[in-house]
Image (cartoon, helix red, strand yellow):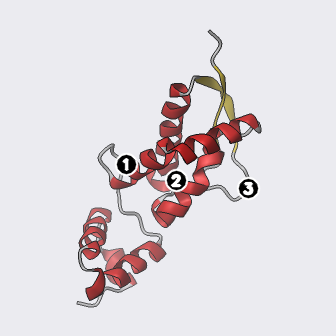
């Protein structure tokens, strides 16, 4: 069966997600083309927010908690930017079109960043606009926790 953009649009987000995962098992038999079509379509793979078991959430956690992710969050914070501004480029590079605001993906990313920043000894300082070109529009700013 040939998968087209029209057929993808007719499927529910959950059916597209299942197709995306199944195609991963058959990369050499046309699966890569299906994954590429789904990625380039911009169509959501979820109808609601992201769950903790969602592969996108799990991958955002891995990126944020990585040594590079933590370093970039701290660098952004030191520069007066939201911590998400430091790690979001890594998330975008890793997840591509699977990271977007319409399924609360940017909210989820901000929540994960908050967990990391609190773990690193920071407290919420406020909110600020994200840099131009970011997927998220605003995010939390952080300051070292005063003890």
Which residue does the numbered mark 3 point to in the structure image? 132
Which residue does the numbered mark 1 point to in the structure image? 58
Say whether disc 1 or disc 3 marks the residue closer to the N-terminus: 1
Which residue does the numbered mark 2 point to in the structure image? 101
Q: Residue at x 53, y 38 (%)?
A: 113
Residue 128 visible at all:
no
- Image position, residue 58 (x, y; %): 37, 48
Disc 1, disc 3: CB below 8 Å? no
Say whether disc 1 or disc 2 marks the residue closer to the N-terminus: 1
Residue 38 occupies which quadrant of the picture?
Answer: bottom left
Local packing at callout 2 (Cα closer than 10 Å; few below 14, some 14-19, many 20+) is some
Look at the numbered disc 1 and give the secondary structure of its residue: helix
Q: In the image as oriented, which residue stretches furthest toward the bottom?
A: 2
Drawn side of residue 4 relative to residue 98, left or right? left
Numbered badge on residue 103:
none
Disc 2, disc 3: CB below 8 Å? no
Look at the numbered disc 2 and give the secondary structure of its residue: helix
Residue situated in front as seen by the camera: 79 or 13 = 79
Residue situated in front as seen by the camera: 43 or 19 = 19
Local packing at callout 3 (Cα closer than 10 Å; few below 14, some 14-19, many 20+) is few
- Image position, residue 61 (x, y; %): 43, 45
Q: Residue at x 34, y 77 (%)?
A: 8
Drawn side of residue 122 relative to residue 111, left or right? right
Say whether disc 2 or disc 3 marks the residue closer to the N-terminus: 2
Q: In the image as oriented, which residue stretches furthest toward the right?
A: 79
Using the numbered discs, state the Cα–Cα distance from disc 2 to disc 3 in whole angstroms. Answer: 15 Å
């Amino acid at each position: 069966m040939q998968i087209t953009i029209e057929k993808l649009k007719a499927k529910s987000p959950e059916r597209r997600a299942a197709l995306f995962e199944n195609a991963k098992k058959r990369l050499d038999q046309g699966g890569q083309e299906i994954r590429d079509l789904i990625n380039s379509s911009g169509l959501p793979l979820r109808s609601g927010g992201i769950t903790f078991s969602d592969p996108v959430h799990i991958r955002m956690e891995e990126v944020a908690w990585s040594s590079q992710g933590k370093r970039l969050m701290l660098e952004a914070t030191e520069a007066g930017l939201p911590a998400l501004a430091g790690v979001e480029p890594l998330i975008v590079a890793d997840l591509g079109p699977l990271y977007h605001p319409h399924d609360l993906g940017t909210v989820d990313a901000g929540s994960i960043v908050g967990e990391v920043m609190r773990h690193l000894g920071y407290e919420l300082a406020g909110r600020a606009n994200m840099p131009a070109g970011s997927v998220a529009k605003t995010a939390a700013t952080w300051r070292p926790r005063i003890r």
